[in-house]
Image (cartoon, grey):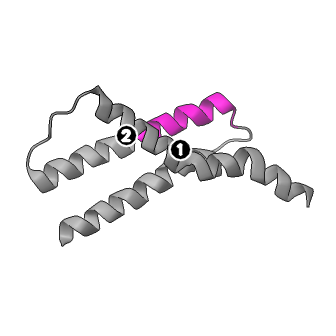
């Protein structure tokens, strides 16, 4: 039962981490910057993906005791899943924010 809760916490962490680059104007949620260019948001998003992936590996090792061997397809699927998780923040930042400002 404890493993189930840790998986839910991991999924919530991944969803929040995927959206942090798009919803926050701070660099890595630490340093406030006046303007964050697009390439910096993508770089920050990639760093959050790496942190989320590393925490997933740590969680797997902690619960199973060993890391499963994976092929390249697994890594592509995790990256695509992180892209899907980031979609609400991306849409808000580039589309919805402008629409809400006009109203």
Q: Main secondary structure of the magenta part?
A: helix
Q: Residue furthest left?
A: 65
Q: Which residue is mark 1?
A: 28
Q: What residue is disc 2 on?
A: 78
Up-down relation of residue 34 to residue 92 (above or below): above
Q: Report whether 9 appears left or right of 67.
A: right
Measured as percent of width and height from the top left, residue 43 is found at 54, 31
Above or below for 16 versus 41:
below
Q: Secondary structure at mark 2?
A: helix
Is residue 30 rendered magenta in the image?
no
x 57%, y 33%: residue: 42
Q: Residues within 10 Å of mark 2 (few under 14, many from 20)?
A: some
Contact flag, marks 2 and 1 (Cβ < 8 Å): no
Please tell me whether residue 40 belongs to the stretch shown in magenta.
yes
Mark before the other along the chain sequence, 2 or 1: 1
Mark 1 residue element: loop
Which segment is the magenta one? 36-50
Residue at (38, 42) in percent of width and height? 51
- Residue at the right extreme, as displayed: 102
Q: Nearer the viewer, residue 103 or 74?
A: 74
Q: 32 or 1, which lies in front?
A: 1
Between the residue at mark 2 and the residue at mark 1, the CA separation in whole angstroms equals 21 Å
Between label 2 and label 1, give the one nearer the viewer. Answer: 2
Q: Is residue 30 visible?
A: no
Q: Is residue 77 left or right of residue 44?
A: left
Q: Is residue 16 left or right of residue 56?
A: right
């Amino acid at each position: 039962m404890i493993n189930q809760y840790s998986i839910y916490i991991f999924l919530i962490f991944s969803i929040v981490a995927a959206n942090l680059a798009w919803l926050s104007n701070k660099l890595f949620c630490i340093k406030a910057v006046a303007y964050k260019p697009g390439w910096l948001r993508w770089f920050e998003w990639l760093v959050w993906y790496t942190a989320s992936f590393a925490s997933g590996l740590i969680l797997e090792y902690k619960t199973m005791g060993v890391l499963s061997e994976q092929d390249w397809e697994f890594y592509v699927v995790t990256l695509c899943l992180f892209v899907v998780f980031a979609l609400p923040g991306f849409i808000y930042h580039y589309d919805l924010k402008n629409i809400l400002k006009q109203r």
